[in-house]
Amino acid sequence: MLALQTGRVDCAVFAALLGMTAVKKNPAIGKFSMLTEPVIGLPACLAIPKEDNQDWKTFLDVWVEYNRGIGQVTEWLTNGMKLAGVEPDDIPSDVKL
């Protein structure tokens, strides 16, 4: 990020959330754009202690899938981006949260 801000590089590759936030906070670094190929998704992960009883892990797996399925995860991410000044209209249509 510092190399980009000081003009020592022309481009930097970041996860979408970090890239959008950086450009919003410092528009002088340039514009945010998504790479078109390859399109990949990066998982968000929970860390829990490894246990013989898998009930808690199973519950969390179901909870995450449910909240992703109803759009809650997208809402949480979008609302979190607002805290950094990134409004929903700032998020390009090709960014899938």
Image: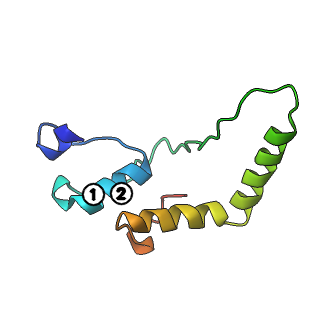
Residue corresponding to mark 1: 23
The residue closer to the viewer here, 50 or 90, is: 50
Please, what is the three-letter code of the amino acid marked with disc 2?
Met
Q: Residue at x 53, y 61 (%)?
A: 77
Question: To which quarter of the image does residue 56 belong?
Answer: top right
Q: Position of residue 73 (x, y in %)?
A: 62, 60
Residue corresponding to mark 2: 20
Q: Position of residue 79 (x, y in %)?
A: 50, 68
**Distance CA(mark 1)–CA(mark 2):** 5 Å
Category of crowding for the residue at label 2, using alpha-carbon neighbours closer than 10 angstroms: few (below 14), some (14–19), many (at least 20): many
Q: Quadrant of the N terminus?
A: top left
Q: Quadrant of the C terminus?
A: bottom right
Image position of 75 (left or right of 4): right
Please, what is the three-letter code of the amino acid marked with disc 1?
Val
Q: Are marks 1 and 2 in contact (CB under 8 Å)?
A: yes
Mark drawn on residue 33: none
The residue closer to the viewer here, 42 or 45, is: 45
